[in-house]
Image: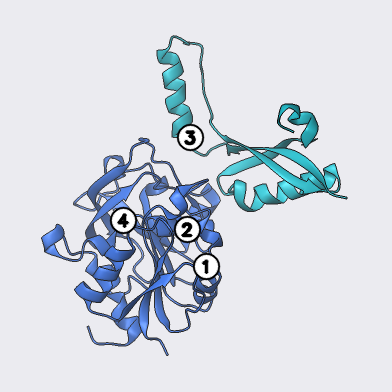
Amino acid sequence: MKQYVAIVTFPGSNGDHDAWHAFSSDLGVPTRMIDYRDTDLSYAAAIVIPGGFSYGDYLRCGAIARFAPVMNSVKQFAENGGPVLGICNGFQVLTEAHLLPGALLRNASLRFHCAWIHVRVDASSTAWTDSLGTGEILRLPVAHGDGAYFADSATLDRLEEQQQVVFRYCDAEGATVDTANPNGSERSIAGICNDQRNVVGMMPHPERATDELVGGADGLKVISAAFTFLGVPA
Amino acid sequence: MSEHWVAEVLVMPKDGVNDPQGEAIAGGLRDLGYSSVQRVRSGKRFTVELLASSESEARANAESMADRLLANPVIEVFWIEGVTPKHQSNADAS
């Protein structure tokens, strides 16, 4: 029985409570915090790997979190087609765990970048973006020091061919110009999905854009996919 | 019988992977007056002390560690610079 959205907390996570608030309060769906030592995810309808600095970002962002006990269960859940969303550090964890291709490198500017940016939805047919239209523009915040998406050119070509580039950094009109790319990501990539399209990783924070009171609510368009996972009316 | 070995593991960004830290360091060196500097790539060095019954076993273990954790093969290359018995490489600390 799929009962709730599971939000994983690692030592050093800091977006976990933002995610909890976004799902449980702003969206109003059953949500549960999952400790990194827990291994039972059998009641989860979806898993969110939140932002932050898991294990202090030591070695490489996400490199140590990948070996946390919960990650075997996350991997199994993902391989069985369960919806997984990795946000910021969560995206980094998913690449380190080989659930998503590529890696996130230090921002080209070498600066931590904290700002509201625009992304364009380039592939909407994923577990988390099904209700969005291709070409739709979302305004979301980013807050990261290591967000430059990298993969070798063969992998990038394959991602494009298979429409696995879910979000690209763009200007307010949707143009993917260099000035709108906050970190030097290859091909302006802000988010991707796996082959099965159930695992999505993104650097921007949809869970921090769920109320006009905090500057925007476009993030709800992403996380509201949880209604579908839980089989509840929106 | 297990012996105490010291493996030196070096990790560098792959060719073609941006290294903004290396670029910033190159800029800093030029600012210091080293106008001859053409390029800097920055990496990591790990000193792993481990127990193994032979040098080849220690090396194989260090390679496995580097491949699985110390380096990310998507963006980095690694090599084992050396594997030495602990007492030789660190005589003052024994």
Q: Report the quarter where the C terminus of chain B lies.
A: top right
Reading the image, the residue beneath label 4 is A204
Q: Determine whether the residue tagged by mark 2 lies in a helix, strand or loop.
A: helix
**Among the 4 quarters of the image, the one containing residue A107:** top left
**1 or 4: mark nearer the eye:** 1
Quadrant of residue A225 in the image?
bottom left
Chain identity of mark 2: A
Q: Which residue is mark 1?
A: A71
Q: Is residue A209 left or right of residue A53?
A: left
The furthest residue to the left = A213
Q: Which residue is mark 3?
A: B19
Q: Is residue A27 above or below residue A183?
A: below
Helix, strand or loop for disc 4: loop
Q: Residue at x 31, y 44 (%)?
A: A181
Q: Which mark is residue A93?
A: 2
Q: At which x and y percent is residue A144?
A: 34, 47
In the displayed structure, A168 sits above or below A180; it is below
Which colour denotes chain A? blue
- Asked whether the beta carbons under mark 4 and mark 3 sit within 8 Å of each other, the answer is no
Q: Are marks 1 and 2 in contact (CB under 8 Å)?
A: yes
CA separation in Å, label 1 and label 2: 9 Å
Q: Are marks 1 and 4 in contact (CB under 8 Å)?
A: no
Q: What whole-number distance in Å separates the C-alpha atoms at marks 1 and 4?
A: 22 Å
Whether callout 1 and callout 2 share a subunit is answered yes
> Residue flagged by tag 2: what amino acid is it?
Val
Marks 1 and 3 sit apart, C-alpha to C-alpha, by 29 Å
Q: Is residue B56 left or right of residue B40?
A: right
Q: Residue at x 35, y 35 (%)?
A: A109
Tell me the SS state at disc 3. loop
> Which colour denotes chain B?
cyan
